Image: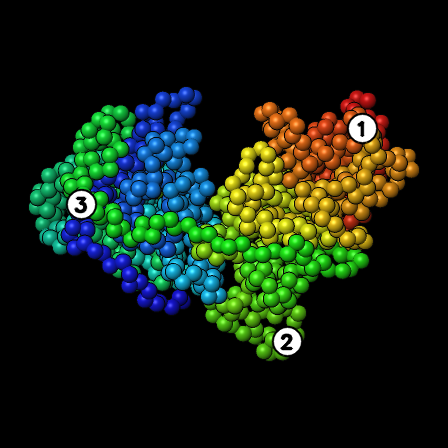
């Protein structure tokens, strides 16, 4: 469905074909050496201090060396972005080493502290990784969404003029296609008419444990074709193609086509004599076959039979250079895992490492002398100057650093505050965004929202009605045209600012990841907001983790949440998400109770998303200098709103993570701490206690995550000698008597707040939800799960009586 458009004219190779090919073949050889040596060095040459195997994947690297040589040294342009198959990381680092962007020191410390990372990492490596990879399947999917984001930015005419349209390229292990997220991404990609995306499948027919099912290629072919992709199969290399033209060649081709993957792999491992024996036994009677085989000695026969197009430089270049349109394209590249290494084709080769003897043989083969292992051109046939000159003209490296930056979008200190006596945080969120949508500000223009089919039910409708839905093509709202009354106006156009996704939550987080890297990938800042039901965060959790790991910047609004979602019941009622909020790195989690708190948090979040300072260590308690993403856990429970106007100090406390809604008297023996939608129960219980304990405090925890982070940071700082360090939560709890008690209450796992007792050593009675919810109304559910006023009072009584086990 994507319309092909001719797009690249630049980058015509400067060298004659034969010379170019010769250089590429030399570099291909060098990459295989360097990748293998990097892993060998880490495992055998570097002293081990802990007895752990260091690991690395020499066979997986060998599988992709030809393809990566062709891509990086000829085909790619600086504007292209690549997700490299995770276990081909050493090949990537070696490429950057040859291009002068990676140091020898980092290669020598591959998989060691501060060295090149085991799997390419945007944040931990410094040699220009475009997309981190590691959890298989996610890198590939990420390219699809990055391509969508590229279109979003370009269709708004924002793209910097000097930055041409790029291709989003994924180098994908064939077993990665087992991951369900691949299919979800293809499906949503199809809906969005994705283009400029290449997936190169390293079809070595091996995974970690095993050889893959026979004839998988047929499935792959059909699948990509059905999703509107162009499929280019690279099966036979030039040598085999030539052999097929000889007498007996037809039979040979048929034999290979029919050969089960396992047998092919086993014969690859066994070598020339085994090939000959098998071929003779199976098709020796075919006319011309024996002569064809006899014209090859064992080594040459092995070379012929393993001449697959994915590892044949000419075939690979032909395939890549032959594409001149923007259709999404899948290259199904036949390869051999471990090609060129002693365990080529062996089914157990995934984590296999060459032993020192095998490495010595490999070294001889590569003509590498002792001490010259890291020399860039040692052992190659072409002179170093020729190769150096070739590397100097590599188009991919032409413009130096490929990461971009974007100016900050100004954010007002306060956002418009919806007025209503009673409101839920979810409704407040929708109204704040709808109000922003009226605005002609840069902030409003740069916000992009997305949701996996829960746009309306998470209250984004108002925003979408004003800002429209993004689509590469203008599409009318048929319901509106037909005068069917609806509150939702869903016209689509390139100007729209909401990207509607199918239900797959994985795709939501991958899209947020891509949108949240727009400033770095495409030089244009976006402020992405994604909404989903809180319980379904877990459905997309790995993609959320993946987005955070790349340091993408976004706001995820999860609503509704907890058993407060009362009638919906059961597994829709999230329990553990507050703990995800606490533990997920790169994500500041908030659970406000009131809409004025939410407005303050949102305003801060838009700024926090854009920060990029260097984390200052333990004195930067909350990592506020470096910035990050934000998770808001909201609710549909309408709450009476406090009548107050937030001053800067209170707004600051809300961002820090908590404030005293009712401050305790100095030396108070009791305080109730609550988060989110259970505020009315906490407030009522607190009121009731005041008769007996007039000094009791009521602590509103807006971000358990940030309070907790600050506490741990302060502890670490004191351990390291900064004796005066004090965390915000320590300051907050300081007025309470040391032998006082805390009752904590939240609609989620109680551990999210119960740690508060450990800060200064207060006894804790923790209320929360530990078991699956069920349908009901709030009185029944809060009673059953012990979140109601009575339960809080009982907990307060137990706390004051100091009830301990056995007492
Ligand atoms: C989500 C996830 N599950 C499991 C793994 C562990 N793992 C790493 S590589 C691999 C097999 C990959 O096979 P393939 O994609 O075909 O790559 P090849 O090494 O054959 O090129 C597995 C299971 C992982 N990295 N990520
Ligand atoms: Mg494989």
**In the image, is 488 to the left or to the right of 280?**
right
- Tell me if I can see residue 349 in this picture: no
Q: CA distance from mark 1 to mark 2?
A: 64 Å
**Residue 483 is drawn in which quadrant?**
bottom right
Determine the residue located farthest toward the right in the rendered image.
691
In terms of image quadrants, where is residue 743? top right
Label 2, on which residue?
484
From this view, report whether residue 721 is shown above or below residue 659.
Answer: above
Q: For the view shown, which residue lies furthest in the bottom direction?
A: 482
Q: Position of residue 653 (x, y in %)?
A: 71, 43
Residue 737 is labelled as 1
Secondary element under disc 2, as helix, strand or loop, is loop
User: Label 3, on which residue?
Assistant: 386
Classify mark 3: helix, strand or loop: helix
Label 3 packing within 10 angstroms: few (<14), some (14-19), many (20+): few
Q: 5 or 455: which is nearer to us?
A: 5
Q: Is mark 1 within 8 Å of ligand 1?
A: no
Q: Nearer the viewer, residue 188 or 380?
A: 380
Mark 3 vs 1, N-terminal side: 3
Give the x, y percent position of residue 234: 27, 53
Mark positioned earlier in the residue sequence (3 or 2): 3
Ligand 2: give its quadrant: top left
Instruction: Look at the image and tell me in which quarter the C terminus lies.
Output: top right
Binning the other alpha carbons within 10 Å of mark 2 as few (below 14), some (14 to 19) or many (20 upward) gives few
Location of residue 42 in the rendering, given as x and y in whole percent from the top left corner: 35, 29
Position of residue 342 in the picture relative to residue 473 (left or right): left
Marked residue nearer the N-terminal end (1 or 2) = 2
């Amino acid at each position: 469905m994507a319309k092909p458009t001719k797009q690249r004219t630049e980058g015509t190779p400067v060298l004659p074909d034969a010379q170019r090919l010769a250089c590429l073949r030399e570099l291909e050889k060098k990459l295989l050496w360097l990748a293998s040596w990097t892993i060998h060095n880490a495992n055998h040459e570097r002293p081990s201090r802990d007895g752990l195997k260091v690991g690395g994947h020499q066979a997986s690297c060998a599988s992709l060396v030809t393809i990566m040589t062709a891509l990086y040294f000829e085909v790619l342009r600086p504007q292209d972005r690549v997700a490299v198959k995770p276990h081909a990381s050493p090949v990537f680092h070696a490429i950057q080493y040859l291009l002068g962007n990676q140091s020898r020191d980092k290669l020598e410390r591959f998989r060691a502290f501060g060295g090149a990372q085991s799997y390419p990492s945007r944040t931990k490596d410094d040699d220009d990784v475009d997309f981190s990879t590691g959890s298989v399947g996610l890198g590939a999917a990420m390219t699809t969404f990055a391509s969508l984001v590229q279109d979003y930015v370009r269709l708004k005419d924002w793209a910097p003029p000097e930055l041409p349209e790029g291709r989003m390229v994924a180098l994908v292990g064939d077993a990665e296609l087992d991951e369900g997220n691949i299919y979800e991404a293809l499906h949503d990609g199809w809906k969005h008419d994705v283009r400029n995306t290449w997936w190169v499948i390293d079809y070595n027919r091996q995974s970690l444990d095993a050889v893959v099912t026979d004839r998988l290629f047929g499935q792959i072919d059909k699948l990509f074709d059905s999703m509107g992709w162009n499929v280019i199969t690279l099966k036979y290399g030039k040598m085999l193609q030539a052999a097929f033209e000889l007498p007996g060649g037809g039979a040979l081709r048929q034999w290979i086509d029919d050969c089960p993957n396992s047998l092919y792999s086993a014969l690859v491992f066994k070598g020339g004599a085994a090939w000959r024996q098998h071929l003779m036994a199976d098709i020796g009677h075919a006319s011309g076959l024996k002569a064809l085989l006899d014209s090859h000695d064992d080594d040459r026969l092995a070379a012929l039979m393993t001449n697959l197009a994915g590892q044949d430089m000419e075939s690979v270049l032909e395939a890549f250079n032959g594409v001149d349109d923007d259709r999404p394209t899948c290259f199904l590249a036949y390869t051999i895992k471990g090609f060129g290494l002693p365990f080529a084709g062996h089914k157990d080769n995934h984590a296999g490492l060459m032993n020192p003897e095998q490495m010595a043989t490999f070294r001889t083969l590569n003509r590498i002398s002792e001490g010259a292992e890291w020399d860039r051109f040692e052992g190659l046939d072409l002179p170093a100057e020729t190769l150096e000159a070739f590397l100097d003209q590599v188009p991919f490296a032409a413009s130096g650093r490929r990461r971009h930056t974007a100016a900050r979008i100004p954010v007002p200190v306060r956002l418009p505050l919806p007025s209503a006596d009673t409101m839920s945080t979810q409704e407040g969120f929708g109204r704040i965004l709808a109000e922003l949508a009226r605005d002609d500000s840069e902030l409003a223009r740069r916000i992009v929202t997305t949701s996996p089919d829960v746009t309306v039910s998470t209250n984004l409708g108002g925003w979408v009605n004003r800002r429209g839905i993004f689509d590469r093509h203008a599409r009318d709202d048929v319901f509106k045209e037909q005068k069917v009354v609806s509150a939702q106006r869903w016209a689509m156009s390139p100007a729209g600012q909401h990207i509607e996704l199918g239900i797959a939550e994985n795709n939501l987080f991958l899209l947020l990841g891509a949108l949240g890297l727009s400033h770095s990938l495409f030089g244009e800042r976006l402020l992405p907001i994604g909404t989903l039901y809180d319980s379904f965060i877990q459905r997309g959790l790995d993609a959320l983790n993946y987005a955070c790991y790349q340091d993408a910047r976004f706001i995820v609004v999860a609503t509704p949440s907890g058993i407060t979602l009362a009638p919906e019941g059961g597994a829709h009622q999230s329990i553990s998400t507050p703990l995800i909020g606490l533990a997920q790195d790169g994500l500041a989690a908030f659970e406000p109770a009131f809409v004025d708190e939410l407005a303050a948090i949102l305003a801060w979040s838009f700024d926090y998303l854009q920060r990029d300072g260097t984390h200052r260590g333990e004195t930067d308690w909350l990592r506020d200098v470096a910035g990050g993403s934000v998770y808001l856990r909201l609710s549909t429970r309408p709450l009476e709103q406090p009548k107050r106007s937030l001053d800067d100090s209170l707004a600051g406390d809300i961002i820090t993570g908590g404030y005293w809604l009712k401050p305790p008297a100095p030396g108070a023996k009791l305080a109730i701490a609550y988060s989110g939608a259970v505020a009315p129960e906490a407030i009522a219980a607190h009121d009731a206690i005041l008769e007996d304990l007039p000094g009791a405090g009521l602590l509103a925890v807006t971000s358990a995550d940030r309070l907790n982070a600050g506490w741990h940071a302060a502890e670490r700082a004191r351990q390291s000698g900064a004796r005066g360090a004090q965390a915000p939560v320590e300051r907050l709890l300081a007025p309470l008597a040391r032998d006082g008690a805390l009752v904590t209450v939240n609609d989620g796992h109680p551990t999210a707040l119960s740690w508060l007792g450990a800060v200064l050593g207060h006894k804790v009675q923790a209320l929360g939800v530990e078991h699956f919810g069920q349908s009901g109304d709030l009185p029944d559910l809060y009673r059953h799960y012990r979140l109601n006023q009575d339960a809080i009072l009982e907990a307060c009584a137990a706390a004051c009586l100091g009830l301990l086990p056995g007492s």
